[in-house]
Image: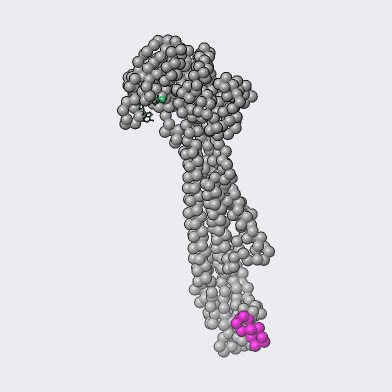
Amino acid sequence: MIRFENVGMRYGPGPEVLRDVTFQLEPGTFTFLTGPSGAGKSTLLKLMYLAEAPSRGLITLFGTDLATARRSAFPALRRRIGVVFQDFRLLPHLSAFDNVALPLRLAGRKTDDYTRDVEELLGWVGLGDRMNAKPPTLSGGEQQRVAIARAVVGQPDLLLADEPTGNVDPEIAQRLIRLFGELNRLGTTVLIATHDRGLIERSRSREMRLVDGRLVELRRG
Amino acid sequence: MSEKQRVRGRILPREKGAAPLDVVIAVMAFLAALALGASMLADRQAESWREGLAGRLTVQILQPEHPTSSRNLNTETEAALQILRGTRGILTVTPMPDADAAKLVAPWLGADAMVKDLPLPRLIDASIVPGEHVDFAQLTARLQTVAPDSNVDDHTRWISRLQTLANTIIYAAYTILALIAVATAAAVSFATRAGLEAHHDIVALLHQMGAHSGFIARAFEWHYLLSTLAASAVGAGLAGIAFLAAGGLEFAGVEPVPFLPPLGLNPQELVWLLAVPLASAAIAWATARLSVLAVLREIY
Ligand SMILES: Nc1ncnc2c1ncn2[C@@H]1O[C@H](COP(=O)(O)OP(=O)(O)OP(=O)(O)O)[C@@H](O)[C@H]1O
Ligand SMILES: [Mg+2]
């Protein structure tokens, strides 16, 4: 599903943030990505969701070699990926409902067709009564849950979540992890970057750890 | 996978009230429409000056100093008429009645009976076939053989001076129009870019979610095309109303601005003012499209 071979990454003329990163994510797997702040977790995710290009090395996504793929093929690849951004990136002028519905609208689905799904999902993440609120009026944790709902609503082939439980209490965090597990059981490959040791301990999933830009395999799921 | 992407409802936020840049666009469109109208008026005025004077000549025959029965003002005038009628390129020849000549001098000499006794010159008005060339020097020479005290005025002096004036006015109007058009285009393009700057996050997010460049560009193109069309239509519309009001005042016999030629635009000329909002909308459309595509090309 995803393959990195000797991938290196630097921002502009800066130092290498990722060095010789090599790993593979099999379809339908569930993986945690850990590492200290500044280790390069978000950078690694950005390479996977096609927000940045690697400085060197080989990335294969859904069987497509990104180095040789045409740019016009990227939008279709991006639509197969759900992303929970570390900084949420919700559209402030759209309601929670419309933010969550955005990927479905971009996929060309009709309002009647997805209204129930979106409402149900917002209920699941505990925002059933905040559906018409605009992101600026939501708390940090509530915004995070909208971002998560938006990432999973289209049942993407790959889910990349950057620190998805950073702003919620442990109880909601457990609930969100169960949501990711549910999605994973339906076939989505899941990768979660997190600092939350508790979350990882309770799970028996694979854990990859980034230290100083190098990837260390801590546990095979 | 279906490549056809659609979004119902607004992906771009609705601006509350008229944004300052919309006001700038409306004002620029107003000025551009005024300049456009003014240049059409100047053009029309210059044309009417040219038409009124070009293609005409006036022959003036003075009373001979020692008139005889065979050689007096009447016989000389008759002979001059013959020559004029026989000249190639002359279309019409109209002797001006004495009464008209008297009227011409009335403002200076008064209209009393004494004027009748003055030796007024005879005036002959002739028009030239459009496009035909008449050799004035030769014509003058021939006329002077039958009427020694005659001269030909082809209005060249006036025409060339009026022509210069008309050209100056037209070039000035066109220069102002061009300057304002450039400023309007710059304002529209600046406003569009500034708006896009504010919406950069939306562009980037839609891109990240797998929206096609064309789809994102279309959303912005329409947004700015419509808002610019609205703002510039308001400005050009106000200018149109100003011209209509001037035309209405003139129709009612009031001179809105003394000494200036008529300021009313006719309907065909008013329609041309539509060019201002249409061109502004086109500029906004193109700027939005090019800017969005440029932003997207920069993003990976
Ligand atoms: N856009 C950028 N331009 C330049 N340097 C960057 C950029 N983004 C990240 N970096 C640098 O790259 C390094 C890795 O950053 P990254 O965001 O990937 O870390 P992280 O592991 O996600 O950290 P955290 O746990 O705090 O989110 C950091 O040193 C950071 O300063
Ligand atoms: Mg990070």
Tell me, what colour scheme is on the image?
A: one colour
In the displayed structure, would residue A44 be above or below residue B98? above
Can residue A67 be seen in the rendering of this structure? no
Q: Residue at x 46, y 28 (%)?
A: A87
Q: Principal SS element in the magenta part? A: helix
Q: Quadrant of ligand 1?
A: top left
Q: Quadrant location of residue B113?
A: bottom right
Q: Residue at x 52, y 46 (%)?
A: B21
Q: Quadrant location of residue B98?
A: bottom right
In the displayed structure, would residue B130 be above or below residue A37? below
Q: Position of residue A132 (x, y in %)?
A: 60, 29
Question: Viewer-proximal residue, B122 or B281?
Answer: B281
Q: Is B106 contained in the magenta span?
A: yes
Question: Viewer-proximal residue, A194 or B259?
Answer: A194
Q: Which region shows up in magenta?
A: B105-115
Can residue A161 be seen in the rendering of this structure? yes
Q: Residue at x 62, y 64 (%)?
A: B256
Q: Is B272 contained in the magenta span?
A: no
In the displayed structure, would residue B273 be above or below residue B256? above
Q: Residue at x 49, y 60 (%)?
A: B172
Q: Position of residue B97 (x, y in %)?
A: 65, 78
Q: Position of residue A218 (x, y in %)?
A: 37, 13
Position of A55 with respect to A92 (left or right) is: left
Question: Viewer-proximal residue, A107 or B248?
Answer: A107
